[in-house]
Amino acid sequence: MEPVDAERDPIYDVTVVTDKREFMCGLMAAMVNINLTFPISKVIFRQMLYGVHIKSAVQQLRLEGLRYLYRGIGPPLMQRSVTISIMFGTFAEYRKLLDTNYGRVVAPSHTSRLCMAALMAGSTEAILTPFERIQMLLQDNHFHRQYNNTFDAFLKLRSYGIREYYRGLSAILCRNGPSNVLFFSLRGEAKNYLPVFDGYEGRLWCSLMKDFISGACVGALISSIFYPINVIRTQMQTKAPGSPFVSIPQALRDVYVLRGRSIRKLYYGVHVNYSRAFISWGIINASYEVFRRLLYD
């Protein structure tokens, strides 16, 4: 089979991975997104944790005041920025590795190599699990008095050993790999299905709009599919340090019982979640393409 031709491949450009600009594009896009959407994410977190309606979650935050509104932004700002950077950067690197070396034997088709690269990139992101663990502890109001900030929480968890930082790793692996496969598989396809605006296709605003809509739709779909796994992960990562570890089946059973054995209640917050994901992934995808144009042009 012939090597991939960058000019004929609409998704993968070999020139992209000759340096580290892909990592930088992902990093900057994530930072823009986190600062704009953190309050929405906090509302979703409270719904995941307590199984309450959106009004109750918003009321909790209102009573706590502005002082605590952005409490916990440190870990996601660091973790999510680096995660998105790793997501785009390692995906490009793994694609290059698979397309130019032994990947054609392991995954002979173009689609299979794309999926394998996305799966590997998602698994690589899991090294940042400690940041998600700290974020969960800081956002849970039960730990407001126990941890002052991100650095304080990291230091206090150290006495419990390295495993304490990686609570919820199994759920994160189940989420990251498959969701990356869907994102990189559907991202380009979604943009191709958007209507063509005669006379405006070459304009920046038109391209940005398409990047936003395609990223937003794919992100909202993926976040809804994997929402129950995020609920389980939240339950696993809000356990007090030193308490027994729980598996995914145990966490699912606990959540199911706590929510009155109602499957519907497992999806509390999903409508806010896909709304946030729609905005979030739209911003990430559009910002990523903007920074990519700036760095490569």
Image (cartoon, rainbow, N blue to C red):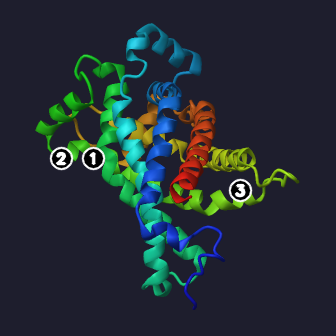
Instruction: Please tell me the numbered disc located at residue 166.
Output: 1
- Quadrant position of residue 67: top left
Q: Which residue is mark 2?
A: 162
**Amino acid type at image mark 3:** Ala
> Residue extending furthest left?
159
Q: Are marks 2 and 1 in contact (CB under 8 Å)?
A: yes
- Quadrant position of residue 271: top right
In this rendered view, identify the residue nearer to me: 2 or 223: 2
Instruction: Give how far across and how far down residue 36 sits, in percent.
Output: 52, 30
**Disc on the earlier residue, 3 or 1:** 1
Element type at mark 2: helix
Instruction: Give how far across and how far down residue 98 sits, in percent.
Output: 46, 78
Local packing at callout 3 (Cα closer than 10 Å; few below 14, some 14-19, many 20+) is some
Q: Which residue is mark 3?
A: 190
Q: Nearer the viewer, mark 3 or mark 1?
A: 3
Q: Is residue 54 visible?
A: yes
**Amino acid type at image mark 2:** Ile
Gap between marks 2 and 1 measured at Cα: 7 Å
In this rendered view, identify the residue nearer to me: 296 or 256: 296
Quarter of the image for the C terminus: give it. Answer: bottom right
Q: Is residue 236 visible?
A: no
